[in-house]
Amino acid sequence: MAARDRSARDTAYLALRSQIMTMRVAPGEKVNEVELAKGIGASRTPVREALSQLAAEGLIVMGRGGGYYVAGIDIAECRSLFEALLLVARSTARLLIANAPDEKLHLLHEATERFDEAVEAFDPALISQRNYELHTLECRLGGNSYITMLGERVHSHAQRLAFMSFSAAGKFGHPDLSTYYGSVCDDHWDQLQAIERRDLETAERIAVRHVQLFRSRVIDYFSTDALADIDLGGFPTGG
């Protein structure tokens, strides 16, 4: 693939992924290939390649009558998502302790600082993106390509839930969000320190606690009326 085509595909991928993650393109909404191509100044070929990549990640689905749709958010599948998050978190903690090179740990430090900066800016889109970047970096530094592939997919789906639950706070006045963010930041730094000490027991315990913390936030979000005006279920299948 020519560098220009690859650049156009990557631009289309990042643009559409950002729209999906921040709900600017809602679950179940049909993707307008023409408008997306026009928006990035590219042909439809790299756009379709980007859509295929997003489909492989489970963020885009094909309608039976043709066309691409943003994948719905199936509340019933959240249990499976959190089971996968827990599996990835524990595996990644073990792999980091065993395999992460000391000279690469500064990358985790920098990613953790970037997350904190997003929290200070109180930017839900940036917070969820920086969180995704931190945890997928952990997967890569663990050195297992299969866990990395699984982690990237699982954390990608978690990112959309994270944005929904974080951004709702501004609209619905969630009273404990500052406390929640503080706990998330503490977990990130505590985990990094455990990795630096090669303390497997502590690292794994924090990894589990971190997933449980996110799960509690999502459950709290679903228990409000925050979903009342959002269609989460499925997508049109007739065309």
Image (cartoon, grey):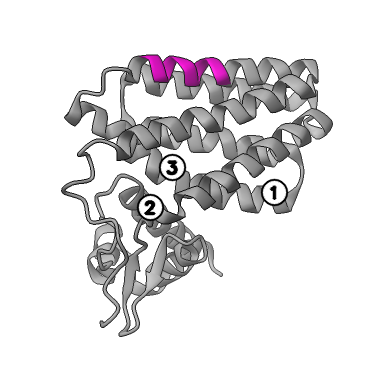
Helix, strand or loop status at disc 3? helix
Residue 188: image x %, image y %? 57, 21
Residue 76: x and y in percent read 41, 55
Spatial separation of the CA atoms under disc 1 and disc 3: 17 Å
Residue at the bottom extreme, as displayed = 65
Name above or below for residue 71 compared with residue 168.
below
Residue 210's spot in the image, x, y percent? 55, 27
Q: Quadrant of residue 161?
A: top left
State which quadrant residue 99 falls in: top right
Q: Which label was assigned to residue 147? A: 1
Label 3 Cα neighbours within 10 Å, binned few <14 / some 14-19 / many ≥20: many
Q: Is residue 54 magenta?
A: no
Would you say the residues marked 3 and 2 are in contact, meaning their CB atoms lie under 8 Å apart?
no
Residue 4, image x, y percentages? 47, 62
Give the residue type that dot 3 points to. Gln
Residue at the image position 20 percent from the left and 23 percent from the top: 173
Which residue does the image show at 79% across and 19% down from the upper left?
A: 199
Decide whether the magenta segment is chiefly helix, strand or loop. helix
As shown in the figure, which amino acid type bears the numbered disc 2? Ile
User: From the viewer's perspective, is the residue at label 3 or at label 2 nearer?
Assistant: 2
Q: CA distance from mark 3 to mark 2?
A: 15 Å
Q: Is residue 69 left or right of residue 216?
A: left
Residue, disc 2:
75
Q: Please, what is the three-letter code of the amino acid marked with disc 1?
A: Ile
Q: Secondary structure at mark 2?
A: helix
Q: Nearer the viewer, mark 2 or mark 1?
A: 2
Against 19, residue 207 (above or below) is above
Q: Is residue 83 left or right of residue 205?
A: left
Q: Which residue is mark 3?
A: 159
Magenta segment: 179-187
